[in-house]
Image (cartoon, helix red, strand yellow):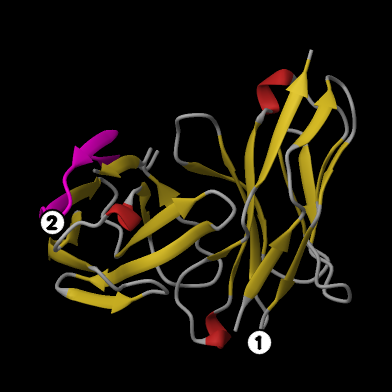
Amino acid sequence: GDSVTQMEGPVTLSEEAFLTINCTYTATGYPSLFWYVQYPGEGLQLLLKATKADDKGSNKGFEATYRKETTSFHLEKGSVQVSDSAVYFCALSDAKGGRRALTFGSGTRLQVQP
Amino acid sequence: DVKVTQSSRYLVKRTGEKVFLECVQDMDHENMFWYRQDPGLGLRLIYFSYDVKMKEKGDIPEGYSVSREKKERFSLILESASTNQTSMYLCASSFSLGPNQPQHFGDGTRLSIL
Protein backbone atom coordinates (compact mmCIF):
# COMPACT_ATOMS: atom_id res chain seq x y z
CA GLY A 1 0.00 0.00 0.00
CA ASP A 2 0.85 3.66 -0.04
CA SER A 3 3.35 4.99 2.49
CA VAL A 4 5.28 8.15 3.31
CA THR A 5 8.65 8.23 5.06
CA GLN A 6 10.01 11.36 6.68
CA MET A 7 13.29 12.05 8.40
CA GLU A 8 13.08 11.74 12.13
CA GLY A 9 13.31 14.82 14.28
CA PRO A 10 13.71 16.94 16.06
CA VAL A 11 15.60 19.14 13.67
CA THR A 12 17.23 22.00 15.56
CA LEU A 13 18.51 25.02 13.62
CA SER A 14 19.64 28.53 14.33
CA GLU A 15 17.67 31.42 12.90
CA GLU A 16 18.50 32.15 9.23
CA ALA A 17 19.86 28.65 8.65
CA PHE A 18 18.90 26.58 5.59
CA LEU A 19 16.25 23.92 6.13
CA THR A 20 15.73 20.59 4.42
CA ILE A 21 13.22 18.00 5.62
CA ASN A 22 13.36 14.81 3.59
CA CYS A 23 10.25 13.00 2.42
CA THR A 24 10.01 9.91 0.21
CA TYR A 25 6.92 8.02 -0.78
CA THR A 26 5.61 4.74 -2.14
CA ALA A 27 2.41 4.77 -4.17
CA THR A 28 0.67 2.53 -6.69
CA GLY A 29 -0.54 5.34 -8.94
CA TYR A 30 0.38 8.95 -9.57
CA PRO A 31 -0.19 10.72 -6.30
CA SER A 32 -0.55 14.34 -5.40
CA LEU A 33 1.86 15.39 -2.66
CA PHE A 34 1.36 17.78 0.23
CA TRP A 35 3.20 19.38 3.10
CA TYR A 36 1.19 20.29 6.17
CA VAL A 37 2.39 22.26 9.18
CA GLN A 38 1.15 22.00 12.76
CA TYR A 39 1.97 24.88 15.10
CA PRO A 40 1.86 24.21 18.85
CA GLY A 41 -1.67 23.68 20.12
CA GLU A 42 -3.24 23.85 16.66
CA GLY A 43 -4.50 21.55 13.94
CA LEU A 44 -2.76 20.97 10.63
CA GLN A 45 -2.60 23.64 7.95
CA LEU A 46 -1.83 23.05 4.32
CA LEU A 47 1.59 24.55 3.56
CA LEU A 48 2.02 23.62 -0.11
CA LYS A 49 1.17 20.98 -2.67
CA ALA A 50 2.26 19.55 -6.01
CA THR A 51 0.02 17.48 -8.26
CA LYS A 52 2.34 16.09 -10.92
CA ALA A 53 5.96 15.24 -11.59
CA ASP A 54 8.38 18.20 -11.65
CA ASP A 55 5.80 20.56 -10.15
CA LYS A 56 7.16 22.87 -7.48
CA GLY A 57 4.91 23.89 -4.63
CA SER A 58 5.79 27.04 -2.69
CA ASN A 59 4.38 29.13 0.14
CA LYS A 60 5.77 31.41 2.88
CA GLY A 61 9.34 30.89 1.63
CA PHE A 62 9.03 27.08 1.71
CA GLU A 63 9.45 25.03 -1.46
CA ALA A 64 9.20 21.39 -2.46
CA THR A 65 9.63 19.76 -5.87
CA TYR A 66 7.81 16.59 -6.91
CA ARG A 67 10.58 14.21 -8.06
CA LYS A 68 9.05 11.12 -9.64
CA GLU A 69 12.40 9.50 -10.45
CA THR A 70 13.46 9.52 -6.80
CA THR A 71 9.91 9.36 -5.36
CA SER A 72 10.72 12.34 -3.17
CA PHE A 73 9.17 15.63 -2.09
CA HIS A 74 11.74 17.30 0.15
CA LEU A 75 10.78 20.51 1.94
CA GLU A 76 13.27 23.40 1.83
CA LYS A 77 13.52 26.94 3.11
CA GLY A 78 16.46 29.25 2.59
CA SER A 79 16.34 31.11 5.90
CA VAL A 80 14.26 29.84 8.81
CA GLN A 81 12.75 31.99 11.53
CA VAL A 82 11.82 31.21 15.13
CA SER A 83 8.17 31.39 14.06
CA ASP A 84 8.74 28.38 11.75
CA SER A 85 9.10 26.11 14.79
CA ALA A 86 6.39 23.50 14.30
CA VAL A 87 5.80 19.90 13.24
CA TYR A 88 5.84 19.29 9.49
CA PHE A 89 3.95 16.43 7.85
CA CYS A 90 4.43 15.09 4.35
CA ALA A 91 1.34 13.44 2.84
CA LEU A 92 0.11 11.91 -0.39
CA SER A 93 -3.23 11.38 -2.05
CA ASP A 94 -3.41 8.54 -4.55
CA ALA A 95 -6.79 8.01 -6.16
CA LYS A 96 -5.56 5.16 -8.34
CA GLY A 97 -4.49 3.27 -5.28
CA GLY A 98 -8.14 3.12 -4.33
CA ARG A 99 -7.60 5.04 -1.16
CA ARG A 100 -9.74 8.08 -0.80
CA ALA A 101 -7.96 9.84 2.03
CA LEU A 102 -4.49 11.20 2.70
CA THR A 103 -1.57 9.04 3.79
CA PHE A 104 0.68 10.91 6.22
CA GLY A 105 4.28 10.56 7.27
CA SER A 106 5.11 10.46 10.97
CA GLY A 107 5.98 14.16 11.15
CA THR A 108 9.23 16.05 11.72
CA ARG A 109 9.54 18.55 14.56
CA LEU A 110 11.52 21.69 13.71
CA GLN A 111 12.96 23.83 16.48
CA VAL A 112 14.51 27.16 15.47
CA GLN A 113 16.64 28.90 18.05
CA PRO A 114 17.23 32.69 18.05
CA ASP B 1 -11.70 30.51 4.84
CA VAL B 2 -12.90 27.04 5.74
CA LYS B 3 -13.67 26.60 9.39
CA VAL B 4 -13.61 23.17 10.99
CA THR B 5 -14.67 23.30 14.63
CA GLN B 6 -14.17 20.53 17.14
CA SER B 7 -16.40 20.80 20.17
CA SER B 8 -13.74 20.28 22.85
CA ARG B 9 -10.01 21.04 23.02
CA TYR B 10 -9.47 18.82 26.06
CA LEU B 11 -11.58 15.97 27.38
CA VAL B 12 -11.08 13.58 30.29
CA LYS B 13 -13.21 10.43 30.52
CA ARG B 14 -13.17 7.16 32.39
CA THR B 15 -12.63 3.63 31.13
CA GLY B 16 -15.87 2.09 29.87
CA GLU B 17 -17.64 5.38 29.22
CA LYS B 18 -19.28 6.13 25.88
CA VAL B 19 -17.53 9.18 24.45
CA PHE B 20 -18.71 11.51 21.70
CA LEU B 21 -16.36 13.81 19.78
CA GLU B 22 -18.14 16.35 17.60
CA CYS B 23 -16.92 18.15 14.49
CA VAL B 24 -18.66 20.80 12.39
CA GLN B 25 -17.54 22.40 9.11
CA ASP B 26 -19.02 25.50 7.54
CA MET B 27 -18.08 25.16 3.86
CA ASP B 28 -20.60 22.61 2.62
CA HIS B 29 -17.84 20.05 2.09
CA GLU B 30 -18.88 16.57 0.97
CA ASN B 31 -16.17 14.72 2.81
CA MET B 32 -15.20 14.54 6.45
CA PHE B 33 -12.51 12.58 8.23
CA TRP B 34 -11.43 11.52 11.70
CA TYR B 35 -7.77 10.88 12.47
CA ARG B 36 -5.87 10.15 15.62
CA GLN B 37 -2.39 11.56 16.12
CA ASP B 38 0.18 9.80 18.26
CA PRO B 39 3.90 10.61 18.71
CA GLY B 40 6.05 8.85 16.16
CA LEU B 41 3.04 7.50 14.26
CA GLY B 42 1.82 10.61 12.51
CA LEU B 43 -1.86 10.73 11.64
CA ARG B 44 -3.84 7.54 11.19
CA LEU B 45 -7.27 7.50 9.60
CA ILE B 46 -10.08 6.11 11.74
CA TYR B 47 -13.15 6.69 9.54
CA PHE B 48 -14.27 9.01 6.81
CA SER B 49 -17.58 9.97 5.28
CA TYR B 50 -18.22 11.00 1.67
CA ASP B 51 -21.90 11.87 2.06
CA VAL B 52 -24.62 12.12 4.65
CA LYS B 53 -25.20 8.73 6.31
CA MET B 54 -22.29 7.24 4.31
CA LYS B 55 -19.12 6.10 6.02
CA GLU B 56 -16.03 4.08 5.25
CA LYS B 57 -13.49 2.48 7.56
CA GLY B 58 -9.97 3.82 7.65
CA ASP B 59 -6.85 2.12 8.92
CA ILE B 60 -7.76 1.80 12.60
CA PRO B 61 -11.57 1.64 13.01
CA GLU B 62 -11.63 -0.90 15.85
CA GLY B 63 -13.28 0.48 18.99
CA TYR B 64 -14.78 3.47 17.14
CA SER B 65 -17.94 4.28 15.26
CA VAL B 66 -19.11 7.43 13.48
CA SER B 67 -22.31 9.24 12.67
CA ARG B 68 -23.13 11.72 9.93
CA GLU B 69 -26.78 12.72 10.05
CA LYS B 70 -26.20 16.19 8.58
CA LYS B 71 -23.70 17.29 5.98
CA GLU B 72 -21.92 19.75 8.24
CA ARG B 73 -21.51 17.49 11.26
CA PHE B 74 -19.42 14.34 11.77
CA SER B 75 -19.28 12.61 15.13
CA LEU B 76 -16.75 10.10 16.39
CA ILE B 77 -18.01 7.67 19.03
CA LEU B 78 -15.94 5.58 21.40
CA GLU B 79 -18.43 2.89 22.37
CA SER B 80 -16.56 1.83 25.53
CA ALA B 81 -13.50 3.96 26.11
CA SER B 82 -10.21 2.28 26.94
CA THR B 83 -6.87 3.72 28.07
CA ASN B 84 -5.24 2.92 24.70
CA GLN B 85 -7.61 5.42 23.12
CA THR B 86 -5.91 8.28 24.92
CA SER B 87 -4.73 10.42 22.03
CA MET B 88 -5.13 13.61 20.02
CA TYR B 89 -8.11 13.39 17.66
CA LEU B 90 -8.24 15.53 14.54
CA CYS B 91 -11.24 16.14 12.32
CA ALA B 92 -10.86 17.29 8.70
CA SER B 93 -13.03 18.08 5.70
CA SER B 94 -12.52 18.40 1.96
CA PHE B 95 -14.58 19.58 -0.99
CA SER B 96 -14.15 16.38 -2.95
CA LEU B 97 -12.19 13.15 -2.89
CA GLY B 98 -10.14 14.11 -5.91
CA PRO B 99 -6.40 13.60 -5.42
CA ASN B 100 -5.68 17.32 -5.69
CA GLN B 101 -8.03 18.32 -2.92
CA PRO B 102 -6.41 19.37 0.33
CA GLN B 103 -8.02 18.65 3.65
CA HIS B 104 -8.87 21.35 6.17
CA PHE B 105 -8.31 20.49 9.81
CA GLY B 106 -9.79 21.46 13.14
CA ASP B 107 -7.60 22.30 16.14
CA GLY B 108 -7.92 18.83 17.63
CA THR B 109 -9.33 17.28 20.79
CA ARG B 110 -6.85 15.93 23.30
CA LEU B 111 -8.66 13.00 24.92
CA SER B 112 -7.47 11.32 28.10
CA ILE B 113 -9.04 8.05 29.27
CA LEU B 114 -8.39 7.31 32.94
Q: Can residue B7 be seen?
A: no
Identified at 53% across, 81% down, the residue is: A95
Q: Position of residue A76 (x, y in %)?
A: 83, 43
Mark 2: secondary structure: loop
Residue A16 lies, with reference to residue B53, above or below; the image says above
What kind of residue is marked 2?
Answer: Gly
Q: Is residue B49 visible?
A: yes
Q: Which residues are magenta?
A: B4-20
Between A40 and B54, the residue placed more toward the observer is A40
Mark 1 = which residue? A28
Q: Chain of mark 1?
A: A
Report if residue A73 lies within the magenta region: no
Left or right: where B62 falls relative to B80: right
Quadrant of the image occupied by residue B78? bottom left
Query: In the rendered image of this protein, does residue B68 appear above or below residue A48?
Result: below
Image quarter of residue A94: bottom right
